[in-house]
Image: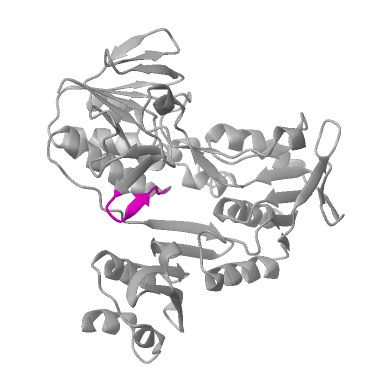
Amino acid sequence: MQTVVMIGAGQASLACAAKLRSKGFDGEIIIIGDEPNLPYQRPPLSKAYLLGKVENERLLLRPQAWYEKEKIELLTSNKVERIDRSNKNIELSDGRLQKYDALVIATGSAARNLPLSMTRSISGIHTIRDLADIERLRPELDVAKNMVVIGGGYIGLEMAAVAKGLGLEVNVIEVAPNILGRVASKETADYILKLHQDQGVQFHVGEQIKELTGEEKIQSVVLENGKEIRADIVVAGIGAMPRVELAEQADLEIANGILVNELGQTSDSDIYAIGDCACYRLQNGDIRLESVGNAIDTGELVACNILGETVSYEPKPWFWSDQFDMKLQIAGRISTQDCVTVRDVEGEGRSHWYHRDGQLVAVDALNAPRAYLIGRKMVLNGLSPTGEQLANRQKSLKEIFESL
């Protein structure tokens, strides 16, 4: 193996590159990113960085010196125009043709935008995905009084919490019957809804948007029920889509992302996909995860397989969200549960435990770090306390764990 090229300069690519070097790979590694910055963390963007609590340098995944030390070529402000599978090269926006022996696609995901027919050319409408998004939003936040968040998912709710903390009037619009409908149980969603309402955030759940008003700048959001909500800023947090355009151009197989096998290989065995854009086809179904943990796991997995180790993917879902003074930590896949047990014990915090067919599959920990750590160990190791055991407040989680 001589040259490994990675398309996308984020957490997954850096995990892959670092693992290759740590395992002794001494060939050429090239990481290509379309942003001008050094690769950086994205989770703090909508929270600490937006609030000015984290400087640019602290966002960086690695300093410039690391790339030089590890002999990793980083091409920023460069876009891959096409993949030529037959000749095993890629064409860059600067005209360069780059050969590869192994190609790793780590293009991530892109924020869904509101329909163009709705937004027209009105300013003040934002998505939250990258550093440039935050730099556009910051100056408007300084002068705004009213924000409307469209979408009651994690990104939207984090943005609502930040804006409310800055003193804005905040309204959240969610078309589904509940916030967090696809990613949390009703127990967790109801708890987080009350948390926001107690801070003064207004919710419009199960409501459709009729139109956005304003000539050049956003002025209001009008609901189908006729209610008009004043808005100096609109943030659309309506989900993300895997970036698969290059894979489609290269005629790779697509299915809710770039389809890969358990080794991370696409339908071309010399091309891999990692991170948000990769959909793994496993025996028990397809899975695509959008999280920092999965980006690292799949990056390291593919590094091992490029080196011929034949390591199979085992999803280990975990995620977190900071809202007001609450840290929500999630381990496991919550969409598969058929039973939820609520555990609220003084000194431990509140946690929600998910079972399917009697097996523990996930845990939500709400300001309950110990519950998260123990619950994650249980899920990863296939240990399964019963709902009755978890509901017993006389037993600590440590005692329950040690009894399994």
Where in the figure is residue 254, as x and y percent of width and height? 40, 35
- The answer to whether residue 302 is seen in the rendering is yes
| Number of dots carrying numbers | 0
In the picture provided, is 194 more to the left or to the right than 11?
right
Q: Is residue 190 above or below residue 25?
A: below
In the picture provided, is 317 more to the left or to the right than 52?
left
Query: Quick one: 149 or 261, which is closer to the camera?
Result: 261
Name the residue rendered at 44%, 68% in the picture: 364
In the rendered view, how is the structure colored?
one colour
- The answer to whether residue 123 is seen in the rendering is no
In the picture provided, is 181 more to the left or to the right than 293?
right
- Point out the stretch of residues depicted in magenta: 282-289
Where in the figure is residue 392, as x and y percent of width and height? 39, 90
Q: Quadrant of residue 21?
A: top left
User: Where's the N terminus, which quadrant?
Assistant: top left
User: Where's the C terminus, which quadrant?
Assistant: bottom left
Where in the figure is residue 121, as x and y percent of width and height? 76, 28
Indicate whether residue 149 is drawn in magenta: no
Where in the figure is residue 136, as x and y percent of width and height? 65, 33
Name the residue rendered at 41%, 7% in the picture: 95
Q: Quadrant of residue 264?
A: top left
Query: Quick one: 85 or 60, which is closer to the camera?
Result: 85
Name the residue rendered at 41%, 86% in the picture: 391
Q: Is residue 346 above or below residue 281?
A: below
Name the residue rendered at 27%, 28% in the picture: 268
Query: Quick one: 38 or 399, which is closer to the camera?
Result: 399
Q: Quadrant of residue 319?
A: bottom left
